[in-house]
Amino acid sequence: MNKISFVFKNKIRTIDFNNSEFSPTSTLLEFIRAQQNTKGTKEGCNEGDCGACTVVVVEKSGNELKYRAVNSCVMFLPSIHGKQVLTIEDIGSSDNLHPIQQIFIDQHASQCGFCTPGFIMSLFAQKADNPNSSKDELIEAITGNLCRCTGYRPIVDSAVDISKLNDLKLFHNYANPELIDSIPVNDIVSLKTAKNEYYIPFNIEDAIKLRKEHKDAVITSGGTDLVLVVTKRKEHLPKIIDVSLLVDTQQIIETKDEIIFGAGVKIEDIYQFSKTKLPAMAEMLSLFGAKQIRNRATIGGNVGTASPIGDILPVLYAYNADIIIKGDTERKVNINDYIIGYRKTLLGENELIKAVSIQKPAPNRITKAYKISKRVNLDISTVSAGFSMELEKNIIKDIVLNYGGMAERPKRASETENFLNGKEWTEQVVTEAMKIVEKEFTPLTDARSSKEARIIMAKNLLLKFYLETK
């Protein structure tokens, strides 16, 4: 099948890539901008930072509908297969404003208007998905939207008014679950053009089969990094396997002793789940991009890139996570053994990440996560850290100090750990340990920071860990 189908303008829209102006590596934004009367969705940064391209994707989650605000500029068009897309034109017009639009007008929150549609769609998705959203949750929902006219006070005032909207029909009357259900999502979608091959499997067995048949294919899940290779670097990706629609990797499973995140679980879903279950994970994920990015990015994609500055990896070290890998057989690899070099892992050429498993921490185990960046939100880590330890009568047991941004991969400060284990958790001991941290790493100097500054940050994060846990 060389076609994809999705719901757009309340109708099934099918794109045959054999006879289309679009290619499999076109973005959802490019498609929207090419349609008539859908110019409210704007192209700003074209890399998922500004939010001007925000649309709402409606998808099935079990028997329920999930509303996700996403950056349409960092989505390959085929990844929308089997879902519904809502743009600003779908929820209101100049003749029939949506209440959110009316509130923006009443509060003078719309200035030049370039960014306003993105704000509206982010707020719409938040209320549609969580009708009881508080003011703070609505404000968090627009973290990924920039107003170039700096009109944030009236926008915050608008969020307060929007939190008071209680009529669910204002948000749930736009989805069409019957049309979504009518699109088949069982057999492998094979999109082939003269320049590209793009495959979409719907279960992990088919994904492994494709992996074996197309060893030169790039694997993508959320695509928030990979899309930029095409849109920013202008590189050609001849073969892609998109695993974002695998139904058997999108569950969070909790047992008495363990939490298992399927590789396809969205970062936003892990963030919400972790607030009460894994607070250190939630703290780090609150700084992971913005909600539009978290609604696309997956834990499998983040772990799979093995980035030395990836936000999640240091926390997984702190939690002593296991990576569940699927190929002809299934195996479990501890996070300490999984990454073997700069963006190199133990993943075999016929294997995929199936899940990430975390044992529930013992009651006396303390876990913390830290991220230092030039901006609080929507920024790459300069230095990050995941720390954990057990304290027994103030004596350190089994401490883990993992740093991101300090080496070619996330790296534990092993000598510092050895020094601290068995010692009393005091400022004097920590001060001595900071001197060892300084000698353990030789970080790079780059656009984000100097080598010397990174070393100071790493030392100070250990001190901060002590001050927060003494």
Image (spheres, grey):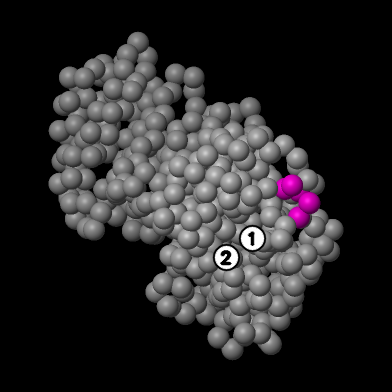
* Residue type, mark 1 in image: Ile
As drawn, 221 above or below 285: below
Question: SS class of the residue under badge 2?
Answer: loop
Q: What residue is at 51 percent from the left and 45 percent from the top? A: 155
Assign the N terminus to one quadrant of the image. bottom right
Q: Please indicate whether residue 134 sits to the left or right of residue 49 in the image.
A: right
Assess disc 1: are there few (<14), some (14-19) or many (≥20) residues with their C-alpha within 10 Å of its C-alpha. Answer: many
The answer to whether one can see residue 186 in this image is no
Among the 4 quarters of the image, the one containing residue 457? top left
Q: Few, some or many C-alpha atoms within 10 Å of disc 2 (few <14, some 14-19, many ≥20)? A: many
Please check the rendered image and state whether residue 172 is part of the magenta-colored stretch, yes or no: yes
Q: Nearer the viewer, residue 169 or 438?
A: 169
Image coordinates of residue 124 in percent, x first then y, are 64, 49
Q: Are marks 1 and 2 in contact (CB under 8 Å)?
A: yes
Q: Is residue 43 left or right of residue 66?
A: left
Q: Which residues are magenta?
A: 170-174
Marks 1 and 2, how far apart in space? 7 Å
Up-down relation of residue 464 to residue 118 (above or below) = above
Classified by dominant secondary structure, the portion drawn in magenta counts as: helix
Label 2 is placed on what type of residue?
A: Thr
Q: Which mark is residue 41?
A: 2
Q: Which residue does the image show at 72% across and 37% down from the upper left?
A: 166
SS of the residue under disc 1: helix
Residue pointed to by mark 1: 88
Q: Nearer the viewer, residue 295 or 363?
A: 295
